[in-house]
């Protein structure tokens, strides 16, 4: 297995990674976002580049430096992330570490939403949301499908059950599941505990710093190339 000190064992490998949250604008000053920090995806990008891969990182709105040697494409919304990821194919590996919004506003208001404009005088507000496209599922079903397609599943409960369902439903090679919503792991944290599931096995990685988990995940991916 590779480690932080290993040589360029991913040389020549094109790895496409998505990271961070998406922001779905409601009006010129408001949006719907999520708590993804982007740390896991950025750690994977840094590790892959250090190991010699050609890395493209499609990043949602996060304030993090671009890892050395990584080509970064900044996006804001789920729709922008979809276009940037699909437009960056072909690749040998896709790792969907972004927390892509499942819903976006049907309409972005061009002026600030006013309480006084609401039908009930502003006691309640109704915003219609519509489903976004599933970037990961589309990559996995693409004519230029990467050889290895890896998803992430951030779950608050029944982690392995829901992760395995996503593995099968989205036709992934591997899914990295982690529990979120508890202290000291998941979103915003430097540490994480990942359960990596493929058709044959369950690999428990962690709890460890995201940089260590990144290398361990890349070891599992490399074994499939
Ligand atoms: N994903 C994606 N595009 C979306 C939604 C999710 O590419 N519109 C990807 C994420 O990047 C992640 C995987 O799908 O790799 C799983 O995301 P998750 O939110 O856990 O799963 P969903 O399929 O959205 O299911 P749900 O949120 O209902 O649990
Ligand atoms: Ca989701």
Image (tube, rainbow, N blue to C red):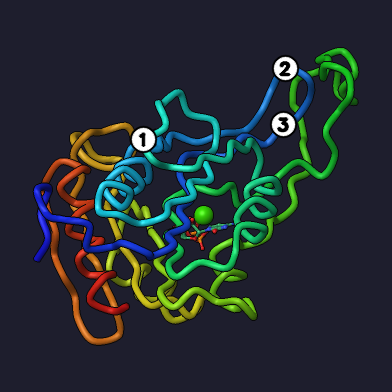
- Look at the numbered disc 1 and say if its residue's Cβ is closer than 8 Å to ligand 1: no
Between marks 3 and 1, how big is the CA–CA gap? 28 Å
* SS state under label 2: loop
CA gap between label 2 and label 1 equals 30 Å
Q: Secondary structure at mark 1?
A: loop
The number of numbered badges drawn on the structure is 3
Dot 3, how many residues are within 10 Å of its Cα: few (below 14), some (14-19), or many (20+)?
A: some
Q: Name the side, left or right, on which 75 lies relative to 42.
A: right
Task: Give the residue number, with chain letter if any, for mark 3.
Answer: 25
Residue at 15% x, 47% y is 212
Vertical position of residue 53 compared to residue 59: above or below? below
Which residue carries the number 2 mark?
29
Residue 167 as seen in the image, left or right of residue 185: right
- Mark 1 = which residue? 67
Q: Quadrant of the N terminus?
A: bottom left
Q: Which numbered circle lies on residue 216?
A: none
């Amino acid at each position: 297995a590779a480690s932080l000190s290993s040589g360029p064992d991913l040389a020549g490998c094109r790895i496409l990674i998505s990271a961070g949250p998406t922001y779905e604008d409601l009006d010129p000053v408001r949006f719907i976002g999520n708590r993804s920090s982007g740390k896991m995806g950025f750690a994977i990008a840094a590790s892959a580049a250090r190991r010699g891969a050609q890395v493209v990182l499609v990043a949602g709105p996060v304030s993090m430096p671009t890892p050395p040697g990584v080509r970064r494409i900044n996006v804001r919304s789920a729709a922008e992330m979809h276009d940037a990821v699909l437009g960056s194919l072909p690749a040998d590996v896709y790792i969907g570490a972004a927390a892509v919004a499942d819903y976006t506003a049907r309409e972005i208001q061009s002026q600030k939403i006013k309480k006084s404009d609401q039908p009930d005088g502003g006691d309640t507000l109704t915003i219609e949301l519509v489903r976004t496209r599933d970037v990961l599922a589309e990559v996995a079903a693409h004519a230029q499908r990467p050889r290895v397609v890896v998803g992430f599943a951030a779950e608050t409960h029944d982690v392995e059950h829901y992760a395995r369902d996503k593995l099968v439903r989205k036709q992934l090679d591997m899914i990295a599941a982690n529990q979120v919503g508890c202290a000291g792991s998941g979103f915003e944290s430097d540490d994480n505990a990942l359960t990596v599931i493929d058709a044959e096995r369950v690999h428990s990685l962690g709890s460890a710093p995201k940089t260590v988990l990144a290398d361990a995940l890349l070891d599992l991916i490399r074994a499939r190339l």
